[in-house]
Image (cartoon, grey):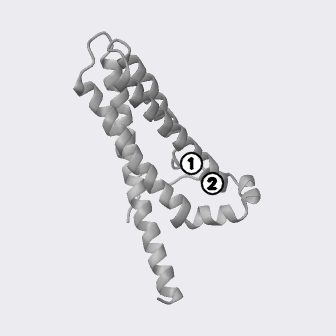
Amino acid sequence: MNRVDFAVTSALMYSGVLFVHSWIRWVVILLGVLATARALGARGRPWTAADDRPGLFFTIAFDVQFLIGLCLYLFISPNTASAMQNAGAAMANAQARFWLVEHPFGMIAALVLAHIGRVRVRKGFGDRRPRTAALFYGLATLILLITQPWPGLPYGRPLFRGW
C-alpha cells in the first residue's frame, strides 16, 4: 500500500468511525434521559424490571460509545494525534484542549457515574433504588450533555453528521 492509498484509507476510516460515534451519542443521550425519567417516575412505588431496563441499556450504549471514542482518541483522530505531539501548545488552544482533555475527562466521569449508579441500583434496597438511579443517571447525563461538542462552540460539531 503506498502513502496515497494509506492516507485515503485513514481518512475514510476516520470519517466512518466519527460518523458512527456522532450518531450513537443520540442513543446514549436519549437512554440517559429515559433512565433518569424512569427513575424519577418510580419514586413512591416498588422498583420493577421495567424501571431497571433503561439504566441497563444506558450503560451498555455508553460503554459501546466510549469504546468507539477511545479508538478515535488513541488511534484514528488526526486532531488528538496532533494535540498529543505538543500538549503544551494544545492547552493554550480551546479547541485542542477540549478534544485532548475536557471531552475525554467528562465522558470518563459520566461513564463512571453511570456504572456506579447501575451497581448501586442492582444491589440497593427497593425504596432507595429510584432515588439512587435518578441521582447517578441524572448526573451522568448532565455531564454527558455539558461535555458535548455542541454547534456554536469553538470546538463544536454538527448535531447530525453526514457521511
- Residue on which disc 2 sits: 100
Of 94 and 55, nearer the camera is 55
Q: Residue 60 carries which label?
A: none
**Crowd class of label 2 (few under 14; some 14 to 19; many from 20; radius 10 Å):** many
In this view, the residue farthest toward the top is: 44
Q: In this view, does 154 lie to the left or right of 129?
A: right
Residue 4, above or below 24: below
Residue 88, above or below 10: above
In this view, the residue farthest toward the front is: 123
- Residue on which disc 1 sits: 104
Residue at the image point whose x is 48% and y is 75% from the top: 10
Label 2 sits on a secondary structure element that is helix
Q: Is residue 91 left or right of residue 119?
A: right
Residue flagged by tag 1: what amino acid is it?
Pro
Label 1 sits on a secondary structure element that is helix
Residue flagged by tag 2: what amino acid is it?
Leu
**Crowd class of label 1 (few under 14; some 14 to 19; many from 20; radius 10 Å):** some
Task: Count the numbered circles shown.
Answer: 2
| Circle 2/circle 1 CB separation < 8 Å | yes
Residue 51, quarter of the rendered image: top left
Residue at the image point whose x is 40% and y is 66% from the top: 16
Of 27 and 157, nearer the camera is 27
Q: Where is residue 58 in the image (x, y as percent from the top left)?
A: 35, 38
Q: How much space separates mark 2 and mark 1, taking CA atoms? A: 7 Å
